[in-house]
Amino acid sequence: MDNRPIGVFDSGLGGLTVVKEIMKQLPNESIIYFGDDGRTPYGTKSRETVIKYTKQDLAFLLSMDVKLVVVACNTVSALALPEVRPAINVPVLEVIEPGARSALKKSKRGRIGIIATPATTQSGVYPRAIRNMNPNVQIFSQACPLFVNLVEEGWWDNEITRMVAEEYLKELKQAQIDTLVLGCTHYPLLANTISDVMGDEVTLVSSAEELSVTLKELLHKEKLESPDEHATYRYYTSDSVEKFRKLGKMILGKEISNIERVDMENYEQKACKF
Ligand code: DGL
């Protein structure tokens, strides 16, 4: 039994979609969340920059004495985690493998689409993870960079977002996919629009649900489950607390308090150990 918090981080607010699912499935677990809103998006940046930011994010999160780290960001999972993972001294979960597993479970005709940031798409991690589990599926990838900005703007379901979605998704529609992986933390917030554009016959998949199941199993296996009945939640952002409060409330569907601003420059030196 271990009542220390779980550390979750993302390039911005989108990772709260993962936090929401963890809160639902693991109500006893306390969470410390860090969103690097001051430097988002990561998905259009180079691998070197994403690795540099990730090291600082980890230095901050691990300084908070978390018992486990959840990398909610697909871009970090794809580009930086393989390099930094060996230096992390607590268990780590990422989002690519759970997303890939979930897509294979849900796909009926083996025609799987993946939408993600340009960095995640170019890395090819999702197709690799899916093919490692089942080489007999057809995979179609599409980067949707503007989706992140639309979400951060709070435009989840309006005419402009719909037009952008139609443009990005037209080739996936032509490819007649049956399952679509939302390979970016922000995209589940556009699920209504994406589903309207793709049609009812396409199943949308996000990593959060499957990741939470894996997390539950891991906590049990490592004897890290929390005995507490009253979980606490603390949030940290590298940008405006007010913006975090406003958008965070929209994502989690409830008021949030305990938000603090953190200056990532203070973690540059500590990041060297990764
Ligand atoms: N959190 C990122 C991801 O899941 C999306 C936002 C960004 O580009 O930073 O890939």
Image: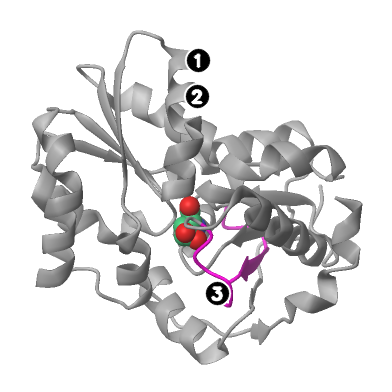
Type of the residue with mark 3 = Asp
Dot 2 alpha-carbon crowd within 10 angstroms: few under 14, some 14 to 19, many 20 or more: some
Give the overall secondary structure of the magenta segment. loop
Secondary structure of residue under mark 2: helix
Decide: is 124 above or below 94.
above
Dot 3 alpha-carbon crowd within 10 angstroms: few under 14, some 14 to 19, many 20 or more: many
Q: Is residue 237 left or right of residue 69?
A: left
| Rendered residue at 24%/54% (across/down) | 191
Label pair 2/1, CB-CB below 8 angstroms: yes
Q: How is the image coloured?
A: one colour
Residue 264 percent location from the top left of the image: 74, 75
In the image, 96 versus 52, the foreground residue is 52
Instruction: Give residue 132's mark.
Output: 1
Decide: is 102 above or below 187.
above
| Rendered residue at 70%/36% (across/down) | 82
The span picked out in magenta is 26-42
Q: Which residue is mark 2?
A: 129
